[in-house]
Image (cartoon, rainbow, N blue to C red):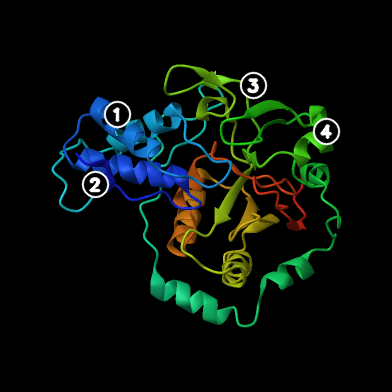
Amino acid sequence: MNSRQLFPPPETGVHSWLFGRAVHLRGEGLDQHTAVAELSRHVASCTFRAGRSVSEGEITEAVSAAFRSTTLPRGSRSVVSPIVDRVADYSEVTGWPVEMPLPRVTVNAERLASVLTDAGGFELADIWEMGAIRPPETPSPRWAMNRLFSETDILCIGRSSSSFEAKPLSAWSNDELLGAQFIVPNPLRKTAGDTKAGGLSAHCRDATGPRRYIVVESDTGLDPDQQAKVIHHLVTVTKADLAAVVLSGGKSVHAWFRCDSVPSRKLHKWFSYAVSLGADPRLWLPEQFVRLPDGKRENGKRQSVLFAEGSK
């Protein structure tokens, strides 16, 4: 197969792109081993944004996830046993299950248009005005972390998607955080867990504890003011508990919602609704990295906090 048949990588959403390319290769009838090799060749021929690279582990996991998934491209030649579409629950003993199907929802363009219209003149600046407490003018990720987490919470934080560390918030200095890009929005239950590839890592599902926050990020090309309208809708209409809003340093806005008291099935239904309005479905996964509040993107841009009233 000519790897040039695969689409080039986007500026953001590389994980989703890898998964989509892996699904395509599976649909072409390749076995899992051959799909890994083919995707590796394609990745080697691609140019990614500054500071972003793709590891062999990311490729292997994308292919493994594609071969477990029920998602198939139109005209696929593969036949795969279906996975039961269930809502995965966290266990204090075993943690999260290995299989966590993403919400099977497509963007509802009519519903999204209605939400944008109903929000009227609400804009990104209005999110700033919603806060009773103003974030610092100078970058201070420790301030944001203190609003969202307790000192004893073990946090997985990364300078990049491949360079990360897990330790209690009390051990993270503001200077360390200023140089970081990513965070798992849910505290860990242990500093390292078993990966699907058989290794140990701080950034994996097995290490991640129960949900405290779920993050909504637009994945449909909405501009920041339109994303603010969606956030406003989720707060005012669905009564979701907004804890923080963070600019990515790029084109997206991350809205953190407190969810630790919400039953898993109710949360899945709510998040599926958010996905129908353009939210990235991969953020359903509790271990997924999001932008660190007031951290620094690889291009040096600040990931500014617009709103932070999360309670510990």
Image spot of residue 130 (x, y percent): 76, 68
Q: Which residue is mark 3?
A: 191
42 in relation to 297, above or below? above
Q: Is residue 104 visible?
A: yes
Instruction: Give the residue displayed 66% in from the left and 27% down from the top.
Output: 165
Is the residue 69 above or below the residue 226 in the image?
Answer: above
Q: Residue at x 47, y 22 (%)?
A: 195
Q: Position of residue 162 (x, y in %)?
A: 56, 31
Q: CA distance from mark 1 to mark 2?
A: 20 Å
Under mark 3, the amino acid is: Thr
**Mark whose residue sits in front, 3 or 4:** 4
The answer to the question of whether label 1 and label 2 lie on touching residues, with beta carbons closer than 8 A, is: no
Disc 1 versus disc 2: nearer the observer: 1
Question: Which label's residue is closer to the chain start, 3 or 1?
Answer: 1
Q: Amino acid at mark 4?
A: Ser
Left or right placement of residue 186 versus residue 288 in this view: right
Q: Earlier in the sequence, mark 4 or mark 1?
A: 1
Give whichever of discs 4 and 2 has the lower sequence position: 2
Question: Residue tagged by mark 1?
Answer: 37
Q: Quickly name the residue at label 2.
A: 72
- Mark 3 Cα-neighbour bin, 10 Å: few <14, some 14–19, many ≥20: some
